[in-house]
Amino acid sequence: MTVVAPVLAELTEAVAVVTLNDPDRRNPLGPALVARLNQVLADLAADPACRAVVLTGAGRGFCAGADLSRLAVTTIAEDRAEYDAIIALNQLVWGYPKPTVAAVHGFALGGGCGLMSWCDFAIVEEGTRLGYSELVAGLPATTVIPALLRLVGRRATLELVLTGRDIEVARAVEIGLASRAVPAGTALEAATELAATLAVHDPAAVRMTKEILRTVEDTAFDESISYAKEIRVLARAMKQPGGPA
């Protein structure tokens, strides 16, 4: 039996291309993929040969979000542990010491669009499906709200998470959710080119610049993450028979 790695990483001339690699299931954020992605990104953060990271998805799209099939087979405690791992991933990407560029094609939905949102830059192909569809599944869009408020502001955040509708790529660029729209089939190339441009700068200066930005921007950030996590756990419990109303 062939075992396929859930995450691939290739380092070329200071730029690491990290690929979510579960294309048959649309690269969902299941526990194996999330655990491996956390480890790969942590390793690259500590590798002086890597100066920038491109995050992309194998197959027809970037990432379809959370692995909702897990809700039917996990206990609340297991669900919380898996959710904690996703929170850890988001926090790792948001506070990453090196530039991160999402190369997005096909679709980025729910937690997949959230993962894109935590990156420093998002290069998105025209025609890509973008959206925060958690409410469609009966869950609040908790994980991404701290990032969205900083990227697009309160009104646009409400529009994105309360409607559950897809957002057009042009609109995503307009409000700051995406950095740039590119023709179909070119996101990875464009993202890699941007990452190579970023990688030429002194790594310490880049790291300190990002730290300054995050310090200035993220007053009460950790508190907002913790609160969002508690709301998600409560929402999951409410879906259990006999859970709180």
Image (spheres, rainbow, N blue to C red):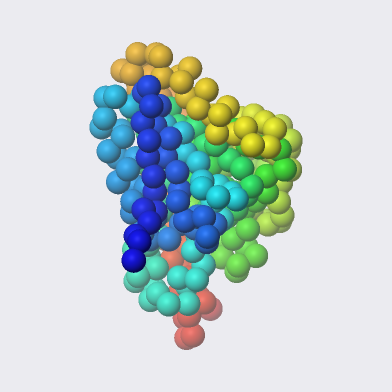
Q: Tell me which corner region of the image, top left, top right, bottom left or bottom right, holds residue 181.
A: top right
**Residue at 40% across / 74% down in the picture?**
74
Identify which residue, 187 or 67, lies in the foreground: 187
> Residue reaching furthest front?
1
**Residue at 41% across / 14% down in the picture?**
200
Relative to residue 108, is residue 185 depicted above or below? Answer: above
Relative to residue 231, is residue 55 depicted above or below? Answer: above
Residue 13: x percent and y percent? 37, 22
> Can the viewer see residue 121 in this picture?
no
> Residue reaching furthest bottom?
242
Left/right placement of residue 229 relative to residue 46 reads right
Identify which residue, 244 or 124, lies in the foreground: 124
Residue 138: x percent and y percent? 60, 69
Q: Tell me which corner region of the image, top left, top right, bottom left or bottom right, holds residue 98.
A: top left
**Residue at 52% across / 22% down in the picture?**
193
Relative to residue 134, is residue 199 depicted above or below? Answer: above
Left/right placement of residue 86 relative to residue 146 reads left
Q: How many marks?
A: 0
Identify which residue, 126 or 159, lies in the foreground: 126
Residue 244: x percent and y percent? 48, 78
**Residue at 50% across / 32% down in the picture?**
101
Residue 164: x percent and y percent? 68, 57
Specify the quadrant that holds the N terminus. Answer: bottom left
Left/right placement of residue 18 relative to residue 166 reads left
> Can the viewer see residue 213 in this picture?
yes
